[in-house]
Amino acid sequence: MTGNKKYEATFKLEVARMVLDQGVAVAKIVKDMGIGETAVRRWVEQYRAEQGGQAGIGKPLSAELQRIRQLEQENRLLRSDNDLLKKAFGLLCTRNEMIYELVDHWQTKASVAQLCRLLGASRSGYYAAKAKTKMTAICVASVHLKAEFAASGRSYGSRRLVSALHAKNIVIGRYKVRRLMREAQIKTVWKRKFINTTDSKHDLPIASNILNRQFNPAEPNRAWTSDITYVRTRTGWLYLAVVMELFSRKIIGWATGPTMPAELVCRALRMAVEARKPAAGLILHSDRGSQYASHEYQHLLKQHGLVCSMSRKGNCWDNAAMERFFLNLKMERVWQRDYANQMEATKDIIEYIVGFYNCLRLHSTLGNLPPMIYEKEMAEKKPIDVSEIT
């Protein structure tokens, strides 16, 4: 008997992956782990649905879908709260507030003094109310600004903060945002010196720079880019391999490990291919490191019909989009942490990718939209049917 024991979503996800990805029999899991067969099959079906892009009927297993479900619930709650506040404000609106609104409306036709005299209000009271309203609006904007800055990992400058506040229907200019930042003593985190981790001293074949810095493809699954970086922990280095969809700047594959063999980049690529299932001909750009020139990685590219592209020697700008992601990751998360071990670092980095970068972080390249929202909006745009043009 398993009782009514509750399992974490990460545990359910791992069990489902054991069945679908590793081929472990359901009966063996039930026997070895003491879990009910019905529960295991339900987790497997949920995982299969999520892999196919569907929501499924149960609670989400993947961190990305959990985050989306949580954000949708929070959005509904905020809308409900906003509606209630609007109704409450309408009921609490005083006589003077109504008079001041009339003065605002008609002051282009007559002087403030004349309007206040006709409506039975004092001019000093009108100006005091205007100053109070302005101060309240500034206080509200300041609170939201601090919240957005903290959520960004102390990385948003005035431009992105303006966009973030506009998304919350707070109309404010960049210069006022700068002033609020100074008053709140808000400063973005500083950059650190770049350290190159590319091992290009090898005799393996090198591909041409086919991508040629064309970082903005017109459609998804036309061009990806990949790279490796390192993260310091108290028990040693953690290496992170990442695959990025250039169309939306979304991170679609990743892998971590204590070393950086060819298998590390292969794991990240397999995850990306499984998630996106690209057609043959997609360009996959990287540096010319030994991992990307390896027989294992090149075989994986050929297996899926992907075209290999590599940066020129010593030219990090040929992979600028990925370098920018690594800089953002370290400024907004890694450099603000002191990881006890590699497992803690891995968990935090994945949470950053899934819970913030892909679904919340504003990207100036995407018109200040997060990658997931950008992909959704681009997919919803109706293509032009040339046959209908006369």
Image: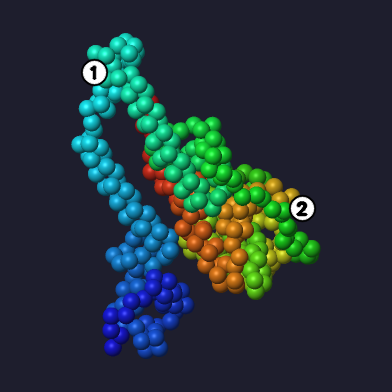
Reply above or below: 107 against 134: above
Give the residue at mark 1: 120
Q: Is residue 91 visible to us here?
A: yes
Task: Let me know if residue 208 appears in the view.
Answer: no
Residue ID at (73%, 58%): 196
Based on the displayed image, in which of its 4 quarters is residue 95 positioned?
Answer: top left
Q: Amino acid at mark 2?
A: Gly
**Residue at the image position 54 percent from the left and 39 percent from the top:** 183
- Quick check: 83 left or right of 345? left
Residue 276 position in % (x across, y down): 48, 58
Which of the marked residues, 1 or 2, is nearer the chain's N terminus? 1
| Figure quadrant of residue 84 | top left
Q: Which residue is mark 2?
A: 314
Q: Nearer the viewer, mark 1 or mark 2?
A: 1
- Amino acid identity at mark 1: Gly
Percent across and percent down for residue 102 are 27, 20
